[in-house]
Amino acid sequence: MSSEANNPNLFQEGMIFLKKGKKLILKKKWEVARENLHKAKDKFIQTNSSLTEAEALWDIGLSYEYEQNLHEALIYYNKSLERRQIAGTSIIKSDSYRKIAELYLFFNNYDEAHQNSQKAVDLLEHENQPIKTAEIHYLQGTIYLQELDYSSALFYYNMVLEYVNYNFSNEFQRKLFENLAKTYQNLGKFPQSNKYFLKSLEIEQRNKNFIIISEILQNIAINFKNLEIQEKSIYYMLDALEFKKKFANNQEDAELGYSYLLYAEILFHFNQIIDAEKACEKSIEIAELSNTQNSKNILVDSLLLMAKIIESNKTKDPNKNAIIEQYLDEAFEIAEKVEYWSGIVKNYIVKSQNKKKRNDIDSVPKLLEVATNFAQKSDKSKDYGDIFEEYGLFYYSQKEYEQAVQYFKQANEKYTLSNSVLDVAETYYNIACTSSLMHLPEETIENLKKAIEIKPYYKTIAKNDKDFAGINKEAVFLDIIK
């Protein structure tokens, strides 16, 4: 029971300190603000005023959060919540749990983030608070998104969409649409992803957030690339580049270099070799200007892409192989210096691909073995997936189909762990092709269906793929690719 009535002077003194502390927070005078808030807290303790004590503790946490000392902020938010449990309303306690969940998410403590966000939403079960409920569901979706559990993230984001008739701020809608777009993108649902990227783009254009606009345009371009729609992919990527060039500065050169790398990858994907080479040269040029880790990684990836572009060029240049080796050697040297182990894995994979094209078959397993050693340093599932995929393609080329299937399946497992959805689709397709050559119709159809479910474009590829010659007249095959 509060003794405020019995100690009115003490309580009023506490309120004066509390108000002063709040004003000092607004003035960013953190230390002095906390001195006043601690004095307020002490007064409220003496008067058994749990809610105002909780408010003072909360504001101390807030001052630490504004000061970017999130560990201390979390300590005081939890202390405040302890006091609010005594006399706080469901709404106040829900708000507390939500804020605490957000900080646990920042620290990647997903278990605590889940627990606190669920407590926050449970407290609103019998309250008419649709906007607060939606905001907590958004937080729950974002926790799963950060955990790379895209299906669960989508479930909660779709729950938020049930509240669309309520008056959400533009900022909340933007975050929701962008996260929905990213979630669909990672699930391989590219048309749905573009739908929400376009919704968020409309909001960002009104707000004139040009850097974010360029990021959205890039993602739309990537989605169209994955949908094999060349014209739109290039159109949106060029649009993104225009924004990046217009608003780039010295700090953002790495991002501009990355945009040129993406543009080069898109052009290379659609076999626009000459333009891809020009874009890749620009990416290299920009990345060389910076010494940051990110710029060095971009430089390595750009050099590797240039090696692939030159390899694919049909012109007969007697120095072609030597030029390719120069790019690969430079990429290796930089990657090793900055410990970009995934870049070295990619390097050896490119080398193995080139050796296979030149019928230097004995070199391929040796190069992939070295790549595996570096994958142990990177410890990334994606790197292992790429290596196993190359082993599978190698044994496929040697008509050792059982061995090829085993490696394709291992690649599939690693790609699934790394949420590399398009790579997962490719492994399903390769398993289908190899199973067809092994005269295993059930395995062929099962894996082809899985590949097409993720990437419908495999229907077009399968129609003319000679690997399916043994079943391409069968009704079940024709039904899949129609």
Image (cartoon, rainbow, N blue to C red):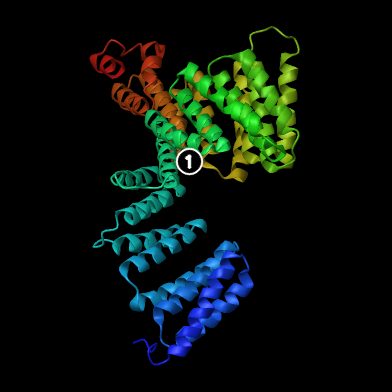
Residue placed furthest toward the bottom: 6
Is residue 114 rendered to the left or right of residue 233?
left
Q: Quick one: label 1, few (<14), some, or many (20+) residues within 10 Å? A: some
Residue 461 picture quarter? top left
Instruction: Give the position of the N terminus as an image quadrant.
Output: bottom left
Give the residue at x 46% y 24%: 224
Name the residue carrying label 1: 418
**Residue 479 in the image: x percent, y percent?**
25, 17
Is residue 457 rendered to the left or right of residue 301?
left
Residue 332 visible to the viewer: yes
**Residue 150 in the image: x percent, y percent?**
40, 43
| Vertical order, 420 against 466 (above or below) | below
Looking at this view, is 307 or 171 the one in front?
Answer: 171
Looking at this view, is 396 or 234 the one in front?
Answer: 234
Is residue 218 rendered to the left or right of residue 187?
right
Give the residue at x 72% y 17%: 321
Q: Amino acid at mark 1?
A: Ser
**In the structure shown, which secondary structural element does the residue marked by tag 1 occupy?**
loop
| Vertical order, 364 against 338 (above or below) | above
Residue 358 visible to the viewer: no
Looking at this view, is 58 or 79 the one in front?
Answer: 58
Residue placed furthest toward the top: 316
**Residue 147 in the image: x percent, y percent?**
45, 49
Give the residue at x 44% y 76%: 54
| Vertical order, 308 against 93 (above or below) | above
Residue 481 picture quarter? top left
Instruction: Give the position of the C terminus as an image quadrant.
Output: top left
**Residue 57 in the image: x percent, y percent?**
49, 75
Give the residue at x 32% y 25%: 449
